[in-house]
């Protein structure tokens, strides 16, 4: 049966003509209809408009949204949601003054997660990961990218990617899979970088392609991790298997990584806590989406992506969670949107655009997700009664979601 949502206080992110992203000053504009209705048919948005023009509802399943706001579900384009166990001790270590680098040098960080993952059966990893996925769906996420990168062995990486594939098969949420074998160098390759990159390219990638386990390829391009030259080799290899790049870059240092990513037509460059004027100029002439991860900055007390500088220069920006066990153990996009407003001085309009249509672009799905557009997936957040959508970032600690619909069905 067709559904109709009526008496919507504010229907947000209404795009009559499909767009793939918004940039610069466009991000300050969030099109909306006050006192609106929306029709769902065959899991897609078939129509919407003002209540003045609402059709007869007698043949519909009716959802009355009096006093409530409706907007597209969040598109979280950067997560590490599949992992084993936790890294709670590292949280305490940071409180006690240890840096990210010091924790890594003591065997913590990514290598700690890799050890746990390789010791944990695939079915257990799936069971742990589906709990996290169900949680973020209830928090309003309707599309998500999930990375590997805690295997760092052929079998470990394949195990992670198979779990991601199984989640995609069993849940209605759109899931994009990213191969991040180049997350860190395993201890046995610490002095043999070429050997590990050869393993990624010659053994991991062919098997991943054979099982069709990934949509994208990623690397941690950063001082002490993967160099610009090493990352370029990985991006080029991924391209041969049809995997476009989405790269971790400029989290701690700026080493001309963004220039390399743009040269290789990366879909997105993610983190960007450090951004130079040269980086901005390079991104401005590209199709690459910058992605900020403010809850990572919040959790490990590093700088926030300079959103105002980037937007004023005419760049687009997406927001994502970076959900992972070490530096952002949260997949709550509502908190990300609020933190972007509070700490990065983004307006609510900019933050919602960044977390919906631009997040969809950073996952390659803006033709089906990220806006209220006829023919797009009926992935919707219905808030509790609130006076204005500004309350979403304002009341940052409150659960303001009443219902989440994914492909037209209530989660």
Image (cartoon, rainbow, N blue to C red):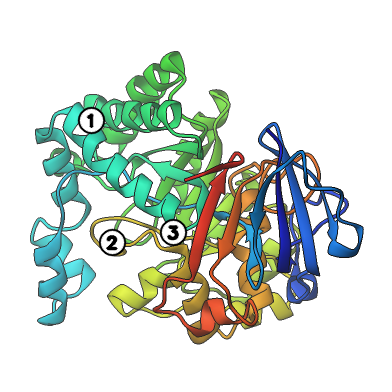
Residue 102 shows up from this direction: yes
Residue 126, image x and y in percent? 26, 34
Q: Which mark is residue 156?
A: 1
* Above/below status of 217 relative to 162: below
Closest to the observer, 93 or 75 = 75
* Above/below status of 304 relative to 211: below
State the quadrant of the N terminus.
Answer: top right
- Residue at 46%, 59% (x, y): give it: 249
- Label 1 SS: helix
**Outermost top residue:** 210
- Residue at 13%, 63% (x, y): give it: 88
Mark pair 2, 1: CA separation: 21 Å
Mark nearer the N terminus (2 vs 3): 3
Q: Which mark is residue 139?
A: 3
Q: Which mark is residue 306?
A: none
Mark pair 2, 3: CA separation: 15 Å
Residue at label 2?
Answer: 329
Mark nearer the N terminus (2 vs 1): 1
Closest to the observer, 189 or 184 = 184
- Label 3 SS: loop
* Above/below status of 289 relative to 238: below
- Label 2 SS: loop
């Amino acid at each position: 049966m067709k559904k109709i949502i009526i008496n919507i206080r504010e229907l947000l992110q209404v795009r009559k003509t499909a767009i793939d992203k918004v940039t610069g000053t466009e991000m300050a504009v969030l099109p909306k209809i006050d006192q609106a209705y929306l029709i769902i048919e065959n899991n897609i948005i078939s129509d919407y408009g003002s209540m003045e023009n609402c059709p007869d509802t007698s043949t519909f399943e009716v959802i009355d949204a009096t006093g409530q706001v409706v907007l597209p579900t969040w598109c979280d384009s950067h997560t590490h949601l599949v992992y084993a166990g936790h890294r709670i001790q590292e949280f305490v270590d940071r409180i006690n003054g240890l840096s990210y680098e010091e924790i890594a040098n003591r065997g913590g960080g990514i290598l700690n997660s890799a050890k746990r993952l390789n010791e944990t059966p695939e079915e257990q990893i799936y069971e742990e990961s589906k709990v996290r996925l169900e949680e973020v769906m209830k928090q309003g996420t309707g599309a998500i990218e999930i990375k590997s990168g805690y295997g760092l062995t052929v079998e470990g990486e394949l195990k992670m990617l198979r779990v991601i594939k199984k989640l995609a098969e069993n849940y209605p949420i759109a899931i994009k899979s990213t191969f991040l074998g180049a997350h860190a160098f395993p201890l046995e390759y610490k002095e043999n970088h070429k050997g590990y990159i050869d393993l990624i390219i010659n053994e991991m990638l062919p098997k991943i392609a054979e099982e069709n386990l990934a949509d994208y390829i990623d690397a941690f391009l950063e001082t002490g991790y993967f160099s610009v030259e090493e990352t370029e080799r990985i991006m080029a290899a991924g391209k041969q298997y049809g995997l476009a790049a989405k790269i971790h870059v400029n989290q701690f240092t700026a080493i001309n990584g963004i220039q390399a990513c743009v040269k290789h037509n990366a879909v997105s460059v993610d983190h960007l806590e450090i951004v130079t004027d040269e980086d901005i100029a390079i991104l401005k002439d590209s199709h690459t989406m910058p992605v900020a991860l403010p809850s990572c900055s919040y959790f490990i007390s590093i700088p926030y992506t300079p959103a105002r500088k980037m937007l004023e220069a005419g760049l687009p920006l997406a927001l994502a969670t970076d959900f992972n066990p070490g530096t952002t153990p949260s997949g709550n996009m509502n908190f990300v949107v609020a933190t972007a407003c509070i700490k990065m001085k983004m307006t609510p309009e900019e933050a919602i655009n960044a977390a919906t249509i631009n997040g969809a672009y950073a996952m390659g799905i803006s033709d089906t997700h990220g806006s209220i557009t006829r023919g797009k997936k009926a992935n919707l957040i219905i808030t509790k009664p609130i006076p204005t959508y500004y309350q979403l970032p304002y009341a940052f600690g409150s659960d303001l979601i009443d219902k989440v619909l994914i492909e037209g069905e209530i989660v």
